[in-house]
Image: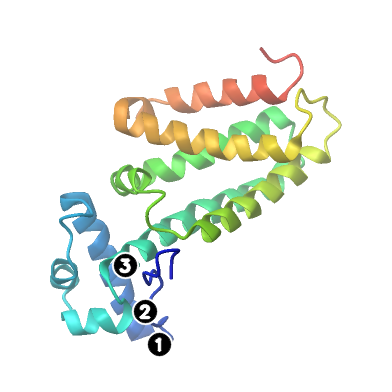
Amino acid sequence: MNHKGIPVKPRKYPSQSRSKVTVDSIVVAASEILIKLGYEKSTTQRIAERAGVSVGTLYQYFPNKKSIFTELQRYYADKLYEHLEKLLEPCRKLPLIEAISLFVEGFIGQIRENLEIWHVLLGYRDQFLPEEERVSRNKRLQGLLIQNMSLREEPLRITDIEMSSLLMISMCESMAHSVITQYPDKLNNGSLEKELKSLLSSYLLVGKF
C-alpha cells in the first residue's frame, strides 16, 4: 500500500507461464489505454477489454487501476535502470568523458525507444510508484555512479560525489521530461544528448567548460 493506504502492488505475481502472459497482456493494454485516454479516463473495464480478458480475471492480479499503472511504471523504470546498470560496469575502464557520453546515450536512448509511453509516464512520475521504491532504485544507480567516479585518477570539479550522482540522475530525468513535452523533435535529432553531455562534462571534469 502507499501512504494513503491504497494498494499499489499486484494481488499476486504470476508463477506460471500462462499467468505471466495474462499479466503481461494487461500491462501492455494499460500502456495503450494510458497513451490514448490518460489516467483519469482509463478504467479497469477498458483495460480488460483491450487485453482480451474478463474484468474478473484482471482483478485476480490487480486490485484496482492504480496498481496496474504502478506495475506499468515499474516495468519501464526497471528496464531503464537495468540497462544503465549494465552500461556502467564497463565504464569504469573508460575516461570519464566517454563514460558520461555512454550514460547519457543509454538514458535517452531507452526513453526514445518507448517515447509515447515515457511521454505519459514522466508526467505521472510521482503518482504511481511508492516513494520508497523510487528512492531504492535511485540509490542503486547512485551507488554505481559513485563507484565509477570515486576510483578515478582524473581530477574532478565536484567535492560531494554522493550529491553529484543524485544530480546527474535528476538532471537526465528532468531534462528528458521537459524536452518530451516541449521540444520532442530535439529528442530525435541528438540535441538533448549533446547538451546533456556538455553540461555533465563541464560540471564533473576540471578544465571542461
N-term-proximal mark, 2 vs 3 = 2
Query: In this picture, is 65 found above or below 161?
Result: below
What's the coloring here? rainbow
Question: Which quarter of the rendered picture does the N terminus lie within?
Answer: bottom left
Of the image marks 1 and 3, the number of the one nearer the N terminus: 1
Image side of residue 18 versus residue 92, left or right: left
Quarter-of-image position of residue 160: top right
Query: How many badges with numbers are in the image?
Result: 3
Where residue 40 appears, as percent x and y from the top left, is 19, 54
124 and 27: which one is in front?
124
Q: Name the residue under label 1.
A: 16
Residue 205 coordinates in the image, percent (x, y): 73, 22
Please tell me in which quadrant of the rendered image residue 46 appears.
Answer: bottom left
The single residue placed furthest to the bottom in the displayed view is 16
Label 1: how many Cα within 10 Å (few below 14, some 14–19, many 20+): few
Residue drawn at 49 percent across, 28 percent down? 193
Q: Is mark 2 on a helix, strand or loop?
A: helix
Query: Where residue 65 sits in the image (x, y, percent)?
Result: 26, 67
Q: Do the residues labelled 2 and 1 touch (CB within 8 Å)?
A: yes
The three-letter code of the residue at mark 2 reads Lys
Q: Identify the amino acid type marked 1.
A: Gln
Q: In which quarter of the image is residue 8?
A: bottom left
Location of mark 2 (residue): 20
Q: Would you name the residue on which mark 3 appears?
A: 68
Q: Is residue 184 above or below residue 22?
A: above
In front: label 2 or label 3: 3
Kind of residue indicated by mark 3: Ile
Question: What residue is at 30 percent from the left and 32 percent from the top?
Answer: 181
